[in-house]
Image (cartoon, rainbow, N blue to C red):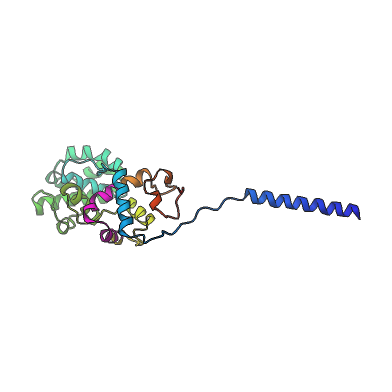
Amino acid sequence: MAGTNTIKKKKAAVKREATKNASSNRAKPIAKKTQPSRNALAPERVNAILKALDEAYPDAVCALNHRTPWELLVATILSAQCTDARVNMVTPELFRRFPTSAAMAKASLPELEELIRTTGFFRNKAKSIRGAANRITDQFGGKVPETLAELITVPGAARKTANVVLGVSYNKAEGVVVDTHVFRIAHRLDLTNSDSAEKVEQDLMRILPRDHWIRFSHQVIHHGRQVCIARKPKCDQCALEKLCYSEDKTWWS
């Protein structure tokens, strides 16, 4: 009987030790999203976000190299599904060969396609920039228009492209540029729940002061490239971390 009791005690001890080890080795739970204690769209929170962006990116500007509104229009069209860095590698030779809208309007599609091939979707983009060149030359006398209504009639110039040109070249805030970075970070900051760039823009236009529309996009784009990246954001380096409650945060202060 004594031997049986000893065996039972040993088995119980082994079981307790196994349970203890399993508990200690169990992965710690990932911190879940903490709901803000106040309205995510409260003016004071929005202002705090804008202040943090101003302090972190006081000199943020458009990353596309250009000298004229025409060059910016073309560069922005080429930047679709392509990095700004790649566009900046392509445009110097493109603009050396075809420096004005009138010159580009006379270019052949094969010529343009070869010059912009590395930006991707080069056939469609070649048609767009030559179409834009024709439109600017024939309808607007070679000058890129300064209104949203006119700009969006130009081939390749949808609302986002038009907002870039108006804001950067003419300092006109007609809307908020929503690219992939702005779309992602606006959601992470709970500034929108909308599922399209157009709706996100409308949401941002409602909550942001108009005098921030232009620089907000530049700052957020820089932030998205450097810190708030798509996968594993660098939350420990983020100037907005204390204002962010995103579920995919990688670090909490």
Name the side, left or right, on which 88 lies relative to 170. Answer: right
Q: Which residues are magenta?
A: 200-219
Q: Is residue 199 above or below residue 31?
A: below
Name the side, left or right, on which 86 lies relative to 95. Answer: right
Residue nearest the viewer, comparing 33 with 200? 33
Asked whether residue 109 is in view, the answer is no
Which residue occupies the extreme right position in the image? 1
- In reply to whether residue 181 is colored magenta, the answer given is no
Name the side, left or right, on which 24 lies relative to 208. Answer: right
Q: Residue at x 37, y 57 (%)?
A: 187
Q: Residue at x 37, y 58 (%)?
A: 190
- In reply to whether residue 218 is colored magenta, the answer given is yes
Q: Residue at x 30, y 58 (%)?
A: 43
The secondary structure making up most of the magenta span is: helix
Name the side, left or right, on which 211 lies relative to 16. Answer: left
- Residue 31 rendering spot, x and y as whole percentages: 50, 53
- Residue 78 rendering spot, x and y as whole percentages: 26, 47
Residue nearest the viewer, comparing 23 with 131? 23
Residue nearest the viewer, comparing 231 with 5? 5
- Residue 196 rendering spot, x and y as whole percentages: 32, 60
